[in-house]
């Protein structure tokens, strides 16, 4: 947004393309490491032994969409930074509506259960990604080409410097949710487990 305001279109395209392709790369890393450490990740997020199999079924599918789900967030911001918030909203809204429609179809109609909910999410997010990408190409303010992708320290540094505040905010929400989940799990186990006295009576 700053570079476009300075009429530095080439520099803006470098930042946009670097952010976009870096997001895809981060998504691939999330997919790979998430799949490798699936069970520890599930337990870290606050699952119990009873819930873990269902959570793993859900996360296993969700991870497949990680590359384009992370990239979709970048595309949405790119549209807003170009002054086209409507197109960004269009991509997010269409994916959300499709997710709602597909949930009962895949969960109950196709009998996929919890995996169906995950498939509905990544399909909806995939459509959202494609719509946002189409809007980027339609507007033609910036071009997301591999030639514009510059993995330079200065470029990455500028992106991180601007994005660090948002990252910290989102990270705090994630950490708080994980802590709350784990506290609630311990609370539920503490008050639902039979006491020694109940065990003796049984």
Image (spheres, rainbow, N blue to C red):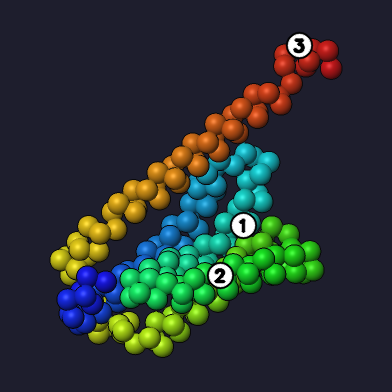
Q: Quadrant of the C terminus?
A: top right
Say which mark, if any, is on residue 197: 3
Which of 95/43 is in front? Answer: 95
Q: Residue at x 78, y 15 (%)?
A: 198
Is label 2 in a helix, a strand or a loop? Answer: helix
Q: Residues within 10 Å of mark 2 (few under 14, many from 20)?
A: some
Q: In terms of sequence position, does the residue under pointer 3 or pointer 1 come before the other?
A: 1
> Whole-percent x and y of residue 159?
25, 64
In space, the residues marked 2 and 1 are separated at their CA atoms by 22 Å
Q: Which residue is mark 1?
A: 58
Residue 80: quarter of image: bottom left
Which of 142/26 is in front? Answer: 142
> Whole-percent x and y of residue 57?
63, 56
Q: In terms of sequence position, does the residue under pointer 2 or pointer 1 come before the other?
A: 1
Say which mark, if any, is on residue 93: 2
Which of 32/178 is in front? Answer: 178
Is label 1 in a helix, a strand or a loop? Answer: helix
Foreground disc of the pair 3, 2: 2
Q: Residue at x 40, y 44 (%)?
A: 172
> Whole-percent x and y of residue 121?
60, 65
């Amino acid at each position: 947004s700053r570079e476009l305001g300075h009429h530095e279109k080439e520099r803006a395209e470098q930042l946009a393309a670097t952010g976009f392709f870096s997001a895809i790369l981060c998504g691939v890393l999330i997919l790979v490491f998430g799949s490798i450490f699936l069970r520890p990740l599930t337990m870290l997020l606050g699952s119990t032994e009873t819930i873990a199999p269902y959570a793993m079924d859900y996360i296993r599918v969700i991870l497949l969409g990680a590359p384009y789900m992370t990239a979709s967030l970048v595309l949405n911001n790119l549209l807003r930074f170009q002054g086209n918030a409507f197109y960004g909203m269009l991509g997010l809204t269409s994916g959300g509506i499709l997710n709602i429609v597909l949930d009962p179809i895949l969960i109950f109609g196709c009998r996929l259960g919890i995996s169906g909910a995950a498939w509905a999410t990544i399909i909806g997010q995939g459509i959202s990604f494609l719509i946002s990408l189409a809007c980027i190409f339609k507007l033609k303010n910036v071009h997301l080409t591999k030639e514009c992708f510059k993995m330079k320290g200065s470029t990455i540094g500028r992106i991180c410097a601007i994005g660090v505040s948002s990252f910290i905010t989102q990270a705090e929400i994630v950490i708080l949710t994980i802590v709350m989940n784990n506290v609630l799990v311990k609370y539920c186990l503490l008050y639902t487990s039979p006491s020694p006295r109940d065990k003796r009576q049984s």
